[in-house]
Image (cartoon, grey):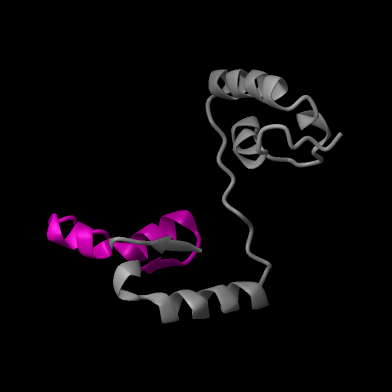
Amino acid sequence: MVALNMMDEAQNRHISIDVARLSEILGIPVIPTVATRKQGMKELIIGALNAARNPGQQPLKITYQREVEEEVAALCAVRCSGCDDLGTSLPPATELAAVPAGNCSR
């Protein structure tokens, strides 16, 4: 689920976002919000509860070009020598973002 925040700022700048289409593209619910006014919070809570009750949805998996993945894999090896032991099937770029520096599984 994505909380699409600052929708008031987008509207003030005449930026139109097709929330339904974005949700369709991402394959997950997209909830427009304005956090400072607590707009969309009820929908966000209901969406989170629904997601918790129906955990079968697959996460979005992004794979980059081979050259990018190779460079990121090299960074991952430097940042966390235990990246190969994380037991995930994540692409290196996603794995790098998911592993805080120094938090190896070893």
The residue lying at 79 percent from left, 38 percent from top is 86
The residue lying at 43 percent from left, 81 percent from top is 42
Is residue 34 among the parts visible in the rendering?
no
Which quarter of the rendered picture does the C terminus lie within? Answer: top right
Specify the segment rendered in magenta.
7-34
Taking the magenta stretch, the answer to whether it contains residue 73 is no
Q: How far from the left and from the top, in percent, is residue 7?
A: 27, 63
Using the image, determine if residue 71 lies above or below residue 59.
above
Taking the magenta stretch, the answer to whether it contains residue 15 is yes
Closer-to-camera residue (95/103): 103
The residue lying at 29 percent from left, 61 percent from top is 6
Q: How far from the left and from the top, in percent, is residue 61?
A: 59, 45
Q: Quadrant of residue 96?
A: top right
Using the image, determine if residue 81 lies above or below residue 40.
above
Q: Quadrant of residue 16?
A: bottom left
Using the image, determine if residue 42 lies above or below residue 6.
below
Closer-to-camera residue (73/78): 78
Q: How far from the left and from the top, in percent, is residue 88?
A: 76, 42
Using the image, determine if residue 61 lies above or below residue 76.
below
| Relative horizontal placement of residue 26, taking residue 87 as reference (left or right) | left
